[in-house]
């Protein structure tokens, strides 16, 4: 856990600067990552907007890998997440990833992978994770864990980019955007978006078979006070019952987890 002050200029809560502005204003070499500092991140982040999908695919690991490790939020995570949000509408990314080699399995589109990463990172900093960590480390946890606090403060800016994709023509894009938006709107300035996201959630549940997506939106609807019984299918019920059995098994271990751990 890193306690030093972030070297990134934070934007207005709902303002998302341009990529180049973020790259220029951030002292990347001073920001800790999972494997050193962030001095190589600007080049990788820039390559994410390459017109070549193979270059973008390689850049994904170089740009996101150093700030993706064991569900941790690093000082470099906030500027990386803002850069990712800033390029979600870039023409090279919104054009999709056409794979012309029939012998090579197609990669998930860059846009979907970026949204997926934003969502996973937002869940690692959501209210539930904070509550668990406060029970473990004390109520001053966020005061000590400045990178997570900074990420949570940046949620309005991140949401402003994700929200624009909730009505995307591609179902995978709009569903992944919805899953990413759910933890972002826990920010006090964004909770009024629950009504809109609930509508998108119902549309997802009516069409998607993706287990991860369905679990996320069902959990969100329940947390927002909605009755989901009419929205669940047989697969949802089986998955819920399986999770209940796992929780019961953990609770019976003695000294084990009585709830899912934050990793």
Image: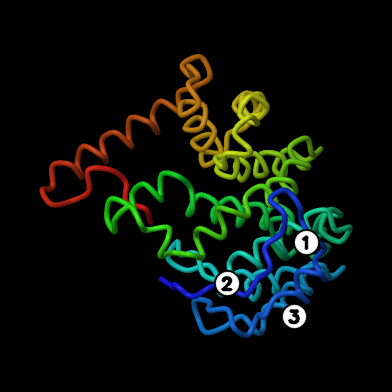
Badge 3 vs badge 2, beta-carbon distance below 8 Å: no
- 241 lies above or below 255: above
Please say if the residues under marks 2 and 1 sit with CB atoms less than 8 Å apart: no
Tell me the mark number nearer the camera, choosing from 3 and 1.
Answer: 3
Q: Nearer the viewer, mark 3 or mark 2?
A: 2
Residue shown at 50%/26% (left/top)?
224
Image location (x, y in percent) of residue 14: 72, 48
Nearest to viewer (mark 2 / mark 1)? 2
Residue on which the image places disc 1: 102
Q: Quadrant of the N terminus?
A: bottom left
**Where 19 sits versus 204, above or below?**
below
* 124, above or below 83, in the image: above
- Seen from the viewer's position, the closer of residues 235 and 161 is 161
Label 3 sits on a secondary structure element that is helix
Residue under the image location 13 percent in, 42 percent down: 252
Residue 198 place in picture, x, y as percent: 61, 26
Which residue is under mark 2? 6
Is residue 131 left or right of 29 when viewed as pictured?
Answer: left
Q: In percent of the image, x 59 and y 45: which residue is there?
A: 184
Location of the C terminus by quadrant is bottom left
Within-10-Å neighbours for mark 2: few <14, some 14–19, many 20+: many
Classify mark 2: helix, strand or loop: loop
Coordinates of residue 117 in the picture (x, y in percent): 60, 57
Of pointers 3 and 1, the one earlier in the residue sequence:
3
Q: Give the x, y percent position of residue 250.
A: 20, 45
Q: Which residue is mark 3?
A: 43
Which numbered disc covers residue 242?
A: none
Q: Residues within 10 Å of mark 3 (few under 14, many from 20)?
A: few
Picture quarter containing residue 78? bottom right
Callout 1 secondary element: loop
């Amino acid at each position: 856990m890193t306690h030093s002050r972030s070297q990134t200029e934070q934007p207005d809560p709902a303002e998302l600067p341009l990529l180049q502005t973020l790259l220029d204003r951030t002292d990347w070499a001073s920001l800790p990552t999972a494997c050193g500092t962030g001095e190589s991140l600007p080049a990788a982040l820039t390559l994410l907007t390459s017109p070549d999908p193979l270059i973008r695919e390689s850049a994904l690991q170089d740009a996101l890998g150093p700030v993706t490790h064991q569900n941790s939020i690093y000082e470099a995570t906030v500027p990386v997440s803002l850069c990712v949000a800033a390029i979600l509408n870039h023409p090279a990314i919104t054009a999709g990833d056409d794979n012309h080699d029939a012998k090579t399995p197609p990669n998930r589109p860059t846009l979907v992978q970026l949204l997926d990463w934003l969502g996973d990172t937002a869940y690692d900093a959501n209210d539930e994770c904070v509550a668990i960590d406060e029970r473990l480390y004390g109520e001053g946890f966020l005061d000590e864990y400045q990178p997570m606090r900074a990420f949570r403060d940046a949620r309005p800016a991140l949401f402003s980019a994700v929200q624009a994709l909730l009505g995307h023509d591609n179902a995978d894009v709009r569903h992944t955007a919805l899953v990413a938006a759910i933890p972002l709107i826990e920010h006090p300035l964004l909770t009024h978006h629950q009504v809109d996201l609930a509508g998108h959630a119902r549309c997802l549940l009516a069409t998607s078979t993706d287990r991860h997506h369905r679990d996320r939106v069902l959990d969100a609807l329940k947390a927002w006070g909605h009755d989901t019984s009419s929205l669940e299918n047989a697969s949802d019920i089986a998955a819920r019952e399986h999770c209940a059995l796992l929780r019961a098994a953990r609770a019976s271990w003695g000294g084990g987890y009585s709830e899912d751990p934050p990793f």
